[in-house]
């Protein structure tokens, strides 16, 4: 299994990365940046699909919350009603998952390639010999030049600059897509999650090779750009927080959904989002970016 | 660690006469322990990649800790450290650089000692020449890029390669550059000199022979992977272990292949010649004893763990250092393991 992974996924990415380093005058830093951009562009249709699916799902959030309150004691009924709601809106709840699953092996390969190519120790360099193609472009680049800007790519950044960049860009990206919750408990949970991941990755940056952190920063920045253009602007980054409930306010009665009721504006909006995804998928069949 | 081969073959408890263990502490490494406010330096044990060299009463060791290294001269009978690794220097022992908080780049290759001078290359790109008291013979020669190989010496000239594809010839008298050549790829193995030629492997999968007078190419031999281990030359034949699982015997003058033997795994460790036998170890831990003139297998010896360290021989015994922290003495004629010593439990 490991051998299959290496042959099909890891080695093509690793060798492309090293060959790119030769093309770019021996700068491994630029090779990481360019390959990250290329991979993200190649996966662009999947990212768009994922973003739109997520957006369509978020449009339905108020209705889902209503249902969760209404059927809090009957999970089976809740599931049925939610599936019905998804069906009305024409949304596949797993639709935002599979583009991510397809992208995952490529991200893992890119991560492994950067770690292996940097070969910080003699053992790492020896291990690299097992994964290289007999291309002149590859052998000429080995061992790679690890200096880039102020960084030594096989070592952690001694300054906090890269850690701040990794944490900051990750926070912006998460904030753009995370809808503020109305429930105060859920809201604190969401805001904690939004903070924890960037903090964790910022912390990792202090001990991981800076080449890997460089890849995280570039990947996050591209993610922000895609989110900006596909998701329609800065998203939830511009919404500071969800409206706070007034302490003495009586709970708003849950509106009963009649079986014959026409789909609400929310469902219609979600259905439109869903149609957009399907339309995009149809266009993709004609070729990448409709060509 | 000093291991008494006689005590080991008798199965005496460690440490016996002349045996010792010396923990070599590295510098307080930046990045050792990191937190949100930055990194706190932490002391750590040093790694020793290069083979130690014994000259007179001293053992010379060069260390590797992250980006830093030091060269140490230790009394080979009674090293100047206590069990806690605290320096308690004996007369004649030294380390370079002398100041405790000063370091050179990490050292991967082995130091060499010629007459009363030690030569060592470091990851900071410099070639150092030190006298028997640890003083610089001349200002370090800067190659401009990382040195991960051992230097070679012949006729008052030191040869050293760096990771910027260059091979340098430096005068041992004053450290001045005699010549340098740039190759199509960086040099993977340490160079070895025989007659008027220098032999080494490169990362573009070639074994090169160049003239020691000016670095001009004599021949190059292509394989399917890197020649990582240092080649061995005897009687106009170059024996070179390769990461493509083969050991090649190549005519030293013409570069023509004489024979090859295919092992079960990559050949990382440097082979040795014992009389008319060539002994080579594969990374998987099989030691092959071959006829040097034909490559015919005399016998394989299974070690049971990965072997990457260079082999060493003395008086018909081969010493093998395996990756599971065991050292073996193997009789070259019979292929029997005379003794084994595992030190993983020794603090």
Image: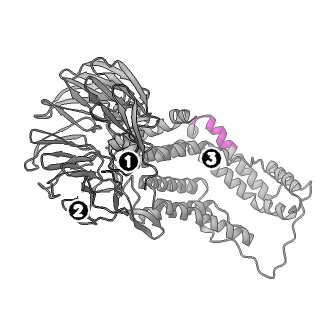
Is the C terminus of chain B in the top left, top right, bottom left or bottom right quadrant? bottom left
> Can residue B86 be spotted in the picture?
yes
Q: Which residue is drawn at 92% across and 54% down?
A: A260
Q: Residue A150 in the image: x percent, y percent?
A: 34, 59
Inspect the magenta stretch and tell me whether residue A128 lies in it. Answer: no
Q: Residue B75 in the image: x percent, y percent?
A: 24, 55
Q: Is mark 3 on a helix, strand or loop?
A: helix
Residue for badge 3? A100
Residue located farthest toward the left when viewing the structure as drawn: B173
Q: Quadrant of residue B51?
A: top left
Horizontally, residue A41 falls left or right of residue B131, namely: right
CA gap between label 1 and label 2 equals 33 Å
Q: In which quarter of the image is residue B258?
A: top left
Q: Earlier in the sequence, mark 1 or mark 3?
A: 3
Mark 1 closeness class: few <14, some 14–19, many ≥20 residues within 10 Å: few
Disc on res. B90:
2
State the residue in front, B128 or A163.
Answer: B128
In the picture shown, does residue B86 fall above or below B142? below
Q: What stretch is highlighted in magenta?
A: A278-287
Mark 3 closeness class: few <14, some 14–19, many ≥20 residues within 10 Å: some
Q: Which residue is drawn at 47% across and 59% down?
A: A205
Query: The numbered mark 2 sits on a residue in which chain?
Result: B
Q: Quadrant of residue A57?
A: bottom right
Q: Is the magenta stretch mostly helix, strand or loop?
A: helix
Residue for badge 1? A121
CA gap between label 2 and label 3 equals 63 Å
């Amino acid at each position: 299994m490991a051998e299959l992974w290496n042959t099909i996924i890891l080695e093509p990415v690793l060798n492309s990365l090293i060959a790119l380093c030769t093309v770019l005058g021996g700068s491994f830093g630029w090779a990481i940046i360019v390959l990250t951009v290329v991979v993200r562009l190649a996966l662009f249709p999947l990212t768009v699909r994922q973003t739109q699916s997520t957006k369509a799902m978020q449009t339905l959030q108020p209705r889902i919350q209503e249902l969760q309150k209404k059927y809090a004691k009957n999970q089976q009924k809740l599931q049925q009603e939610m599936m019905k709601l998804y069906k009305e809106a024409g949304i596949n709840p797993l639709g935002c998952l599979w583009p991510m699953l397809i992208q995952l092996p490529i991200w893992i390969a890119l991560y492994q390639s950067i770690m292996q190519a940097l070969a910080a120790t003699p053992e790492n360099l020896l291990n690299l010999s097992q994964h290289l193609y007999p291309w002149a472009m590859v052998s000429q680049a080995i061992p790679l030049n690890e200096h880039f800007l102020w960084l030594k790519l096989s070592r952690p950044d001694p300054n906090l600059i890269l850690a701040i960049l990794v944490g900051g860009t990750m926070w912006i990206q998460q904030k753009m897509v995370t809808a503020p919750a109305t429930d105060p408990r859920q809201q604190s949970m969401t805001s904690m999650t939004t903070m924890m991941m960037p903090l964790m990755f910022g912390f990792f940056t202090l001990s991981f090779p800076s080449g890997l952190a460089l890849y995280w920063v570039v990947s996050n920045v591209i993610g922000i750009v895609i989110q900006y253009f596909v998701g329609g602007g800065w998203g939830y980054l511009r919404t500071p927080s969800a409206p706070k409930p007034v302490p003495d306010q009586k709970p708003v009665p849950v509106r009963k959904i009649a079986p014959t009721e026409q789909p609400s504006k929310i469902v219609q909006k979600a259905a439109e989002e869903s149609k957009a995804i399907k339309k995009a998928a149809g266009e993709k069949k004609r070729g990448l970016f409709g060509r | 660690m000093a291991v008494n081969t006689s005590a080991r073959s008798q199965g005496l408890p460690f440490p016996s006469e002349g045996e010792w263990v010396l923990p070599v502490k590295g510098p307080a490494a930046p990045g050792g322990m990191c937190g949100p406010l930055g990194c706190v330096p932490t002391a750590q044990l040093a790694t020793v990649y290069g083979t130690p060299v014994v000259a007179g009463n001293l053992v010379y060791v060069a260390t590797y800790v992250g980006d830093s290294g030091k060269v140490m001269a230790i009394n080979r009978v009674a090293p100047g450290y206590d069990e806690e690794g605290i320096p308690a220097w004996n007369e004649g022992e030294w380390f370079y650089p002398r100041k405790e908080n000063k370091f050179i780049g990490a050292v991967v290759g082995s130091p060499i000692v010629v007459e009363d001078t030690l030569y060592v290359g470091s990851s900071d790109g410099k070639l150092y020449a030190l006298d028997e008291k640890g003083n610089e013979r001349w200002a370090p020669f800067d190659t401009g890029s990382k040195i991960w190989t051992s230097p070679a010496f012949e006729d008052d000239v030191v040869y050293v390669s760096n990771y910027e594809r260059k091979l340098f010839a430096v005068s041992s008298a004053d450290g001045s550059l005699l010549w340098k050549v740039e190759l199509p790829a960086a040099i993977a193995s340490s160079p070895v000199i025989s007659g008027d030629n220098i032999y080494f492997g490169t990362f573009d999968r070639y074994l090169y022979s160049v003239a020691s007078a000016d670095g001009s190419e004599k021949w190059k031999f292509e394989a399917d992977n890197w020649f990582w281990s240092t080649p061995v030359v005897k009687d106009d034949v170059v024996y070179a272990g390769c990461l493509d699982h083969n050991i090649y015997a190549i005519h030293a003058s013409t570069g023509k292949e004489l024979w090859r033997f295919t092992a079960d795994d990559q050949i990382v460790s440097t082979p040795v010649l014992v009389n008319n036998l060539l002994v080579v170890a594969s990374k998987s831990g099989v030691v092959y004893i071959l006829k040097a003139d034909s490559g015919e297998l005399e016998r394989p010896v299974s070690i049971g763990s990965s072997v990457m360290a260079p082999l060493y021989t003395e008086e018909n015994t081969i010493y093998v250092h395996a990756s599971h922290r065991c050292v073996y003495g193997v009789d070259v004629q019979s292929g029997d393991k005379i003794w084994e010593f595992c030190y993983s439990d020794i603090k």
